[in-house]
Image: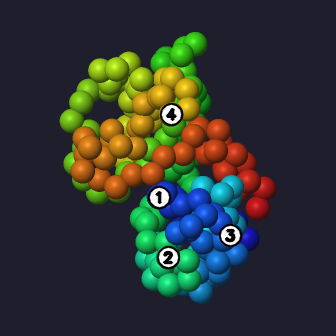
């Protein structure tokens, strides 16, 4: 069976307080109607197949929300994307023009709701710790400068600018996810 979508949970860390363990996360999505699921890493990224029903991935994620809250106390947001959208967002080298020796991470911030970004891209924050590189429907690509705990935070910046709900993954995570999805 081929995976068609990914569910990107916000602020989920499998096995930690307030987050489910892997088996409970996968079971909640299966109980909510998914045909197949595979949790990827521990950050709340889940490959999902819902079968032939168009638009059902969002329905499954919504139906799984009360199950996750009941079973583990997790009540965060779930952003659902077709895998093709992720592949399109990272096609080629979208960070080539902004990557330099100060680059700490290249990220994709997924956003649901809110308004369009109110700034022209590329945009650099006043502290020069974050470049918003490009925006596509539902995703903003960013380069984070500085190291752990000292760099820019693309999720909070995009939320503040748009009023939407976000969750962020690194470029490496997204590329590994796409590879895992294509392997079946």
Name the spot of residue 5 as percent of width and height, x first.
Answer: 56, 63
> Does residue 183 lie above or below 62 as drawn?
above
Residue where numbered disc 4 is placed = 149
* Residue 26 in view here: no
First in sequence, mark 1 or 2: give its number.
Answer: 1
**Residue annotated with mark 3:** 22
Contact between labelled residues 3 and 2, with CB atoms less than 8 Å apart: no
Q: Position of residue 89 (x, y in %)?
A: 51, 41
Which secondary structure, mark 1? loop
Query: From mark 4 to mark 3, how far is it between C-alphas?
Result: 27 Å
The residue shown at (29%, 21%) is 126
- Relative to 15, does residue 139 appear above or below in the rendering? above
Vertical side of 151 occupied by 65: above or below: below
The label nearer to you, 1 versus 2, is: 2
**Circle on res. 10:** 1
Q: Residue at x 64, y 44 (%)?
A: 173
Mark closer to the chain start, 3 or 1: 1
Disc 4 element:
loop
Relative image position of residue 147 (x, y in whole percent)? 55, 26
Name the residue nearer the viewer: 173 or 67: 67
Q: Quadrant of residue 117?
A: top left
Which residue in the rendered view is the most extreme toward the right?
183
Between the C-alphas of marks 1 and 2, the distance is 14 Å
Provide the residue designation for mark 2. Answer: 73
On the image, the x and y values in percent for residue 48 come to 61, 68
Query: Mark 3: which secondary structure?
Result: helix
Chain-order first, disc 2 or disc 3: 3
**Residue 163 visible within the image:** yes
């Amino acid at each position: 069976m081929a995976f068609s979508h990914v569910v990107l949970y916000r602020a989920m860390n499998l096995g930690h307080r307030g987050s489910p363990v892997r088996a409970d996360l996968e079971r909640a999505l299966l109980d909510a109607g998914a045909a197949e699921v595979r949790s990827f890493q521990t950050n709340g990224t889940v490959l999902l197949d819902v079968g032939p029903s168009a638009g059902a991935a969002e329905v499954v994620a919504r139906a799984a929300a009360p199950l996750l809250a009941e079973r583990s106390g997790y009540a965060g947001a779930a952003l659902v994307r077709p895998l093709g959208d992720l592949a399109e967002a990272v096609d080629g080298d979208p960070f080539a023009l902004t990557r330099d020796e100060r680059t700490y991470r290249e990220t994709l911030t997924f956003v649901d709701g809110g308004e369009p970004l109110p700034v022209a891209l590329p945009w650099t924050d006043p502290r020069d710790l974050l470049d918003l590189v490009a925006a596509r429907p539902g995703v903003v690509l960013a380069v984070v400068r500085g190291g752990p705990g000292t760099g820019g935070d693309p999720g909070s910046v995009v939320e503040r600018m748009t009023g939407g709900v976000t969750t962020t993954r690194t470029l490496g995570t997204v590329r590994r996810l796409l590879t895992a999805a294509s392997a079946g």
